[in-house]
Image (spheres, rainbow, N blue to C red):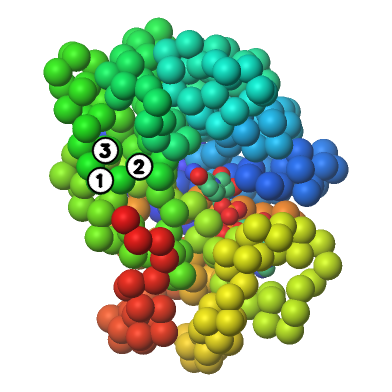
Amino acid sequence: MFNQDMPYRPMGRSGLKLSALGLGGWTTYGASVKDEDTVESIIRHAYQAGINFFDISDIYEKGEAEKAMGRVLGTLPRHELVISTKCFWPMSDDVNDTGLSRKHIFESIEKSLRRIGTDYVDLYFCHRPDPTTPIEETVGAMSDLVRQGKVLYWGTSEHSGAQLKAAAAAAREGHACAPRVEQPQLSLVARHRFHTDVQPAAEELGMGLVTWSPLASGLLSGKYDDGLPEGARLWRSENLRNTYLTADNRQRVRQFKALADEAGVSRAQLALAWCLAQKGVSSVITGATRLEQLQHNLGALKVAITPELNRRLDELFPPGLGRKL
Ligand SMILES: NC(=O)c1ccc[n+]([C@@H]2O[C@H](COP(=O)([O-])OP(=O)(O)OC[C@H]3O[C@@H](n4cnc5c(N)ncnc54)[C@H](OP(=O)(O)O)[C@@H]3O)[C@@H](O)[C@H]2O)c1
């Protein structure tokens, strides 16, 4: 895949190149977006715009996102795509259908490959750390999947810097394949942990970083300025509403409009451009429930974050925002 309008970035110190913007399926495809034609039009447009990285998980609508995205991805040239999925969260109440044990990892990859309709995934993530499984067991199982060719690179998500280092050390000691990519949260309102812990560790280990929820589930677009638009994500999810729609965030996002207006772009584009400009980011995974959102968000690739703009963004969204370690 090559598209002159899309930058491609190396995934850390690996040879793999990822489109600077990726597209993910959390809460959308097979969930809030059930219409197959809409899913197809969004994914096809992403591909035509040069997006090669598509991110899924087994837990997204309990396998339905893998099926919905897999149906469309299966019509595109497989060798051009970087498809990722994940395991960890319970898929049933079976005691072993959860976590990062060798058994769950081996069972999960087979089910994910079948649902997506592919022989291998390019990236396979441990969706969260599993305190009940020794890290050596998880590293050994993931490494074996790489050696079997079912997974090309394995990675982690929402792991701390110390956990990334522990996984790398276990791989070294066990002569196993180390994780090559971490998937952390990063947005203007969730930035502290990324900058103070995850990014420095990933850089030291040569791991790529593919970041999630760049618009804070849509909040940073400004769509919640005047209330809760029916059908929008924070209207649908009370949990996410409580996380993101705080008085503080609402105030900041309103003030953010003036900055974006001055820069001649939308808030969504500026929020995405800021993520793209952060050190160590290999790809920013976006989400879209409508084709127009994706088309609009792709405009972020043309937005430059000047030092002055960066300073003012830091003032409005201070580096301490977001979850602490
Ligand atoms: N590893 C993890 O634990 C983890 C966690 C979360 C996400 N992820 C990955 O990251 C991907 C992206 O996360 P995300 O979906 O939360 O990203 P996001 O960009 O923060 O939110 C995307 C949502 O915002 C709304 N939106 C997008 N563009 C808009 C625009 N221009 N104007 C107004 N509203 C807009 C849409 O929701 P509505 O139209 O429904 O309002 C869209 O579905 C996920 O799909 C998943 O692959 C990973």
Residue type at numbered disc 1: Gly
Residue type at numbered disc 3: Leu
Spot occupied by residue 223 in the image (x, y as percentages of width and height):
69, 75
* Mark 2 close to ligand 1, CB under 8 Å: no
Spot occupied by residue 208 in the image (x, y as percentages of width and height):
31, 42
* CA distance for labels 1 and 2: 7 Å
Within 10 angstroms of label 2, few (less than 14), some, or many (20 or more) residues? many
Instruction: Residue under label 1, please give it.
Output: 161
How many numbered circles does the render carry? 3
Relative to the observer, which residue lies in front, 107 or 208? 107
Q: Is residue 305 visible?
A: yes
Secondary structure of the residue carrying tag 2 is loop
* CA distance for labels 1 and 3: 5 Å
Relative to the observer, which residue lies in front, 129 or 180? 129
Image side of residue 236 versus residue 157, left or right: right
- Vertical side of 264 occupied by 95: above or below: above
Q: Which residue corresponds to the image point at 52% horizontal and 81% vertical from the top-left?
A: 248
Instruction: Residue under label 2, please give it.
Output: 159
Instruction: Residue under label 3, please give it.
Output: 164
**Contact, mark 1 vs mark 3 (Cβ under 8 Å):** yes
Of callouts 3 and 2, the N-terminal one:
2
